[in-house]
Image (cartoon, grey):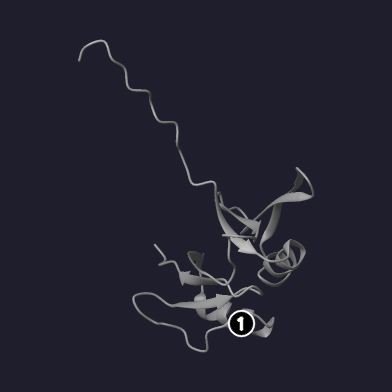
């Protein structure tokens, strides 16, 4: 098929991953206040809606706090893995801040543990191996 052109795909990165939340302000308090993420965006749009993104300092991918509703339930296993330089220390720090963390740290293949946000959404902290 000479003369046909397939358009080039322009996808270059993962920008944001959404987590459904019941109350956006409560979610901001948790993700920023308790987890220590930074608020990257909080913009109003439409009829009383907000687009909110949080992220670890310096991270390129953000977490969008998406208001739950019909067909968008909270309390899910997000399958999101957050990188840590010291999962054991983070486990203790999050527990001290009142975060719902698993009692045990999984040691292999690298230290990791799960925690839940106020809506019951499950995320995992994984220690990134040092180079």
122, 129: nearer the viewer: 122
Q: Residue furthest bottom?
A: 103
Quadrant for the N terminus, please. top left
Q: Position of residue 93 (x, y in %)?
A: 63, 80
36, 18: nearer the viewer: 18
110, 79: nearer the viewer: 79
Quadrant for the C terminus, please. bottom left
Q: What residue sits right under mark 1 in the picture?
A: 100
Q: Quadrant of residue 28?
A: bottom right
Q: Residue furthest front?
A: 70
> Which residue is found at the position 61% from the left and 82% from the top?
100
Above or below: residue 81 compared with residue 43 = below
129, 13: nearer the viewer: 13
Q: Residue furthest left?
A: 1
Q: Position of residue 16 (x, y in %)?
A: 56, 50
Q: Position of residue 80 (x, y in %)?
A: 49, 64
The local crowd at label 1, few if under 14, some if 14 to 19, many if 20 or more residues have their Cα within 10 Å, is some
The number of numbered discs placed on residues in the rendered structure image is 1
> What kind of element bears circle 1?
strand
> Which residue is found at the position 51% from the left and 81% from the top?
88
Apparent side of residue 31 relative to residue 121 in the rendered image (left or right): right
Apparent side of residue 115 relative to residue 3 in the rendered image (left or right): right
Q: Quadrant of residue 25?
A: bottom right
Above or below: residue 40 compared with residue 8 = below
> Which residue is found at the position 62% from the left and 73% from the top?
117
Q: Position of residue 99 (x, y in %)?
A: 64, 80
> Which residue is found at the position 50% from the left and 77% from the top?
114
């Amino acid at each position: 098929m000479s003369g046909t052109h397939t358009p080039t795909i322009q996808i270059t990165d993962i920008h944001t991953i959404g987590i459904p939340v019941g109350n956006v302000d409560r979610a901001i308090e948790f993700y920023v206040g308790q987890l220590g993420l930074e608020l990257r965006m909080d913009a109003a749009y439409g009829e009383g809606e907000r687009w909110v993104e949080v992220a670890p300092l310096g991270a390129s991918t953000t977490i969008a706090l998406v208001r739950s509703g019909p067909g968008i339930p909270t309390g899910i296993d997000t399958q999101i893995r957050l990188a840590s330089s010291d999962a054991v220390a983070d486990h203790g720090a999050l527990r001290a801040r009142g975060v719902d963390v698993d009692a045990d740290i999984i040691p292999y293949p690298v230290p990791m543990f799960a925690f839940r946000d106020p809506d019951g959404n499950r995320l995992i902290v994984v220690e990134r191996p040092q180079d």
